[in-house]
Amino acid sequence: SGSCEPSVTVRDEAGKVITAWAPPPTLTAAERLIQGRGLSVPLLCSAAGQHTIELCFEAKELSEPGVYTMRVGAAVPDFEVWMSPVAINISRYGSQLVQLYVRRVHGYAEPISVTAAFPPLGVISAGGAVAAGADRCWVTLWSDGHRFPRTAFYQELVAEAKINGMMQKRVVQPIMLMDDHAGRGGRQAVAFERSPARVNYYNSGVLIDWETKAPLVLSAGKAREILLAAKLFTGDLVDDYDYIVIAPDKGVSIKNKLASKAADSLRLELVLTADAPFKAGDEADLIIGIMKKTKGASSLVAATQALRFVCQ
């Protein structure tokens, strides 16, 4: 119980360290929570004899005695996927980003896909493609704006990947990340074992108006224009808001933002940057965020669906 950071040391009969594991100091609150659950340490014993396993828990906040189990056996590749936030505020005309965290066990490195499990009409998941060996990515839940439920509902995300050639599914477990107000700094993470995310309805939102099935094509030498439909936002979409590329992390830049004929939409010109980590034919997901300009720092108010693009 509480926040513990386990470390493991294995010694041979002579007391020599065979292997050791400790959580890296740079882990986020979510990563620290995931790494500490079902900790798995690979060990290859080159000689017979007695070995000693030392478990050390550095308790940051321990309110009562903790309980743990230990299994020693053959290494079995596996994976778990976690998500944040728990409450997803999705609009009729837009979406919300969901951060995915992956725990890979015993060297498991296959690609993983995450989708919404049996969503209601009008709700679609996009993105959720965890690359081979990667430990995080984004998925978005978004609405087509017409058939979206008008009441809060619960929605599970399911991760799917191959283990030893067989397709396996895992329910994505929600994590709540909370600001730490107890003076320790950073953020605290709380896990919810089986409670799926609660999706709340609201009116305003933004989406990329892209109805064709063909992917968006982006290149370094030529700007490509997309149309953003931003419904029920106050103020001028060009003058009162900023727009950022949330995904990919780098490689795509917004060259210009331009007014459109309709008051509830605007045009953005996109280009691949010189440091883009893509080659011709590569595909990735594009997510645009809209930020409200304020006297202080701008704040993210909505995000588009994940739109697939191909590099030229």
Image: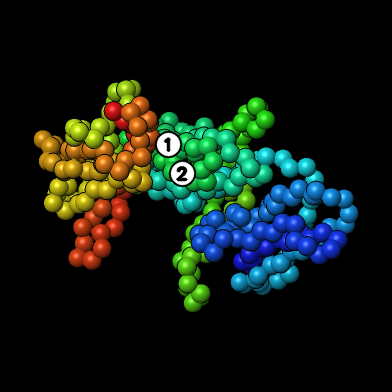
Q: Nearer the viewer, residue 118 or 51?
A: 51
Q: The disc labelled 2 sits on which kind of residue?
A: Cys
Does 65 appear above or below 281? Answer: below
Mark 1 vs mark 2: give the one in front: 2
Earlier along the polypeptide chain: callout 1 or callout 2? 1
Q: Could you tell me residue 85's position as x and y percent?
A: 47, 52
Please say whether residue 225 is visible from this viewpoint: no
Q: Are marks 1 and 2 in contact (CB under 8 Å)?
A: yes
Q: How many marks on residues? A: 2
**Tag 2, which secondary structure?**
strand
Residue behind mark 2: 137
Q: Could you tell me residue 270's position as x and y percent?
A: 22, 38
Q: Is residue 301 left or right of residue 49?
A: left
Q: Could you tell me residue 183's position as x and y percent?
A: 49, 77
Please say whether residue 85 is visible from this viewpoint: yes
Q: Quadrant of residue 141 in the image?
A: top left
Residue behind mark 1: 127
Q: Quadrant of the N terminus?
A: bottom right
Residue for point 68% across, 62% down: 7
Residue for point 41% across, 41% down: 140
Q: Quadrant of the C terminus?
A: top left
Q: Nearer the viewer, residue 13 or 149?
A: 13
Q: Nearer the viewer, residue 4 or 22?
A: 22
Tell me the crowding category of disc 2: few under 14, some 14 to 19, or many 20 or more residues within 10 angstroms, Cα based.
some
Does 97 appear above or below 284? Answer: below
Residue for point 18% across, 43% down: 255
Does 272 appear above or below 45? Answer: above
Does 198 appear above or below 262? Answer: below
The Cα atoms of the two marked residues, 1 and 2, are separated by: 8 Å
Q: Quadrant of residue 22 in the image?
A: bottom right
Q: Nearer the viewer, residue 10 or 81?
A: 10
